[in-house]
Image (spheres, rainbow, N blue to C red):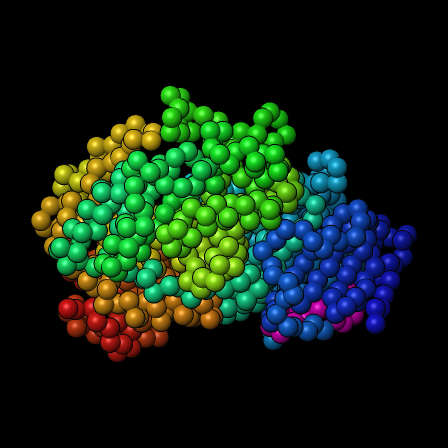
Amino acid sequence: MDTEVDLAVDLAQPAHRTAGVFEERDGALEWRGRQETVRIEPWGPDALRVRARLGGPLLPDLPGALQEPPPAARGTVRYADGRATIANGAIRAELDAKGLLRFVRTDDGGELLAEERAHFWWPGSRLYTATGNGYHRLEQRFSAYAGERLYGLGQHQHGLFDQKGAVVELVQRNAEVSIPVLTSSRGYTLLWNNPAVGRVELAANGTRWVADSARQIDYWITAGAPAEAQRRYSAVTGRAPMLPAWAAGFWQSKLRYRTQDELLAVAREYRRRGLPLSVLVCDFFHWTHLGDWKFDPVAWPDPAAMVEELAGMGVKLLVSFWPSVSPLSENHRPMESAGWLLGTEYGPVAHAEWPDQGAAEPVQVAFYDPTHPGARAYVWSKARENYLDPYGITAFWLDACEPEIKPGFAANLRYHAGPGTEVGNLYPREHARAFHEGLSAAGETEILTLCRSAWAGSQRYGAALWSGDIGTDFATLRAQVAAGLNAALSGIPWWNTDIGGFHGGDPDDPGYRELLVRWFQFGALSPLMRLHGYRAPGSPLGPDMTGGPNEVWSYGEQAAEILADWLRLRERLRPYILDAMRAAHEEGLPVMRPLLLAFPDDPAAWEVADAYLFGPDLLAAPVLEAGAVRREVYLPRGARWTDAWSGAAYEGGRTVTVPAPLERMPLFLRDGARLPLRS
């Protein structure tokens, strides 16, 4: 039964003029005052969801990451001393008569996170600045805490693991992936459940989440150690499917194999050399026109024979599929007529300039709208018609799915789901959804798409994230470790980089060869292992472009021998990797695990940004400096560690310095674990 408690007190006292009314409604706690409604409700075990809106009742069907209905949970609402509380397991929210929220641990009442007013008069902890037509620039403020560490937020190239002190834009760009979830050293994890473009400010004097133009504040918070928080977060946003076994091996790619003969020659050479190969990638410009989504018969005359030959070698073909549609494509007119391309507020339906087959100059291409169910169905129908049905191709590379619009003015875009400023960050997740829905309907059970961007919940659609078009130096390599660890704490267990970086790299340069070897070692102990890049000498962007060689034998005899050893190590670890992938599927725990995830009670583990657990039992410490032959490694307290190469054993809670010659990356086994690291 709904109950209402009027907490408005003596209105003669100015300090109480903002007091509102509490109400218990359907197991949730609501507060209404000064035209604002705030609702706090259980949303899965040990978690609460908060929504707030100015000027009317809450809107129940806005796009977000949380799946409905939520996992079963039951809250307890109480009123006392002019305030109300709602508890759900390990977390309790306290709401005062003025609508100010505070979250505490249920067991001891310790504060986890509290809203904070910007000023004693105005504005408060929540600010709504009208942008027109019922939309507002939304701000949500929380207190800052000395010594707090903050992790997650997707994947970024700033090189930070702990992001306290950073200002991070909430927008999708190549190599900058916005997933608005934070894990705190104070024992909470918070999801900003809003796909609007904006930013989060993690300042010394407060945290502020901002949506540039949206209709409602919406966030989810859970209490507990990071591993438990990952389980709860993945339970409410969706867990990754079980990784297909073929995806756990080595992926070979470059920009780009221009013909069927080029691609098959690479597969045959891997087989001739006896090197493991699981996936071979057919990159962009293999099509007739951008948006035709089919093979050019001149360069790819017999895809059926190609797929059959690769399958006979145990190799899966993965095909690039861009979400952009050239006006020269046979699909542009029907999609535009049906309203399945992204609309614009200013100008024609065109979003970027891009080269296309048969065009002397770049053309103005459009991106389709994956938030429209009809558009998703149409795009998938073309993938099925041109790849799945005739050739049995089920693996797709969803490149440029931020989307890669230039200039990236979200305010100019109109989606089926809403204005671009309100829903723009959804694009990569909904694009992956199109393929997940289509493959599932076709009876496929092994679903993976390689994606350049993601949002909260992308993992439930089988999206494998990679870190985008990045540089080719040691500083960039170091930044990828932090990027991968933060992606792991953002619910994305399937993650990888372009081994060697993307933009350049000369296979004949000794310095680059060293980088490639060190990156290859890191790649071998990443969730997915994929060699890719645009190597020197490159050629101009266009349908005939290609880069230099990028196979494991392309970097000289010394490097080739080392790379072959690490390829075989990856192959021996595949059963272990698939076990870790099962934990991601069933529990939501990432494969690439920050040390703080397994050792939350070790303060030093929260500071390690250059090493990680690969699965539960293997500590990997990539070599991230040119010319290094030794490496310092912190071994977390609470376990005994064995050097995988020397056999030396160490008690945790200490830093050790170990040899790291070019052929070796430091690895440590936890508590007597046995893994086939040596041949």
Give how far across and how far down residue 220 sits, in percent.
61, 59
Residue at the outermost left position: 557
Give how far across and how far down residue 619 sits, in percent.
29, 66
Instruction: State which quarter of the image contains the C terminus.
Output: bottom left
Between 374 and 401, the one nearer to me in the picture: 374
Tell me if residue 226 can be seen: no
Type of secondary structure dominating the magenta stretch: strand
Relative to 480, is 586 on the left or the right? right
Give how far across and how far down residue 649 sits, in percent.
21, 74
Q: Which residues are magenta?
A: 77-92
Q: Is residue 388 above or below residue 634?
A: above
Q: Tell me, yes or no, whether the highlighted magenta stretch contains residue 362.
A: no
Q: Residue at x 57, y 30 (%)?
A: 349
Q: Tell me, yes or no, whether the highlighted magenta stretch contains residue 85.
A: yes
Give how far across and how far down residue 637 sits, in percent.
34, 71
Q: Is residue 214 above or below residue 462?
A: above
Between 158 and 389, the one nearer to me in the picture: 389
Q: Residue at x 52, y 59 (%)?
A: 441
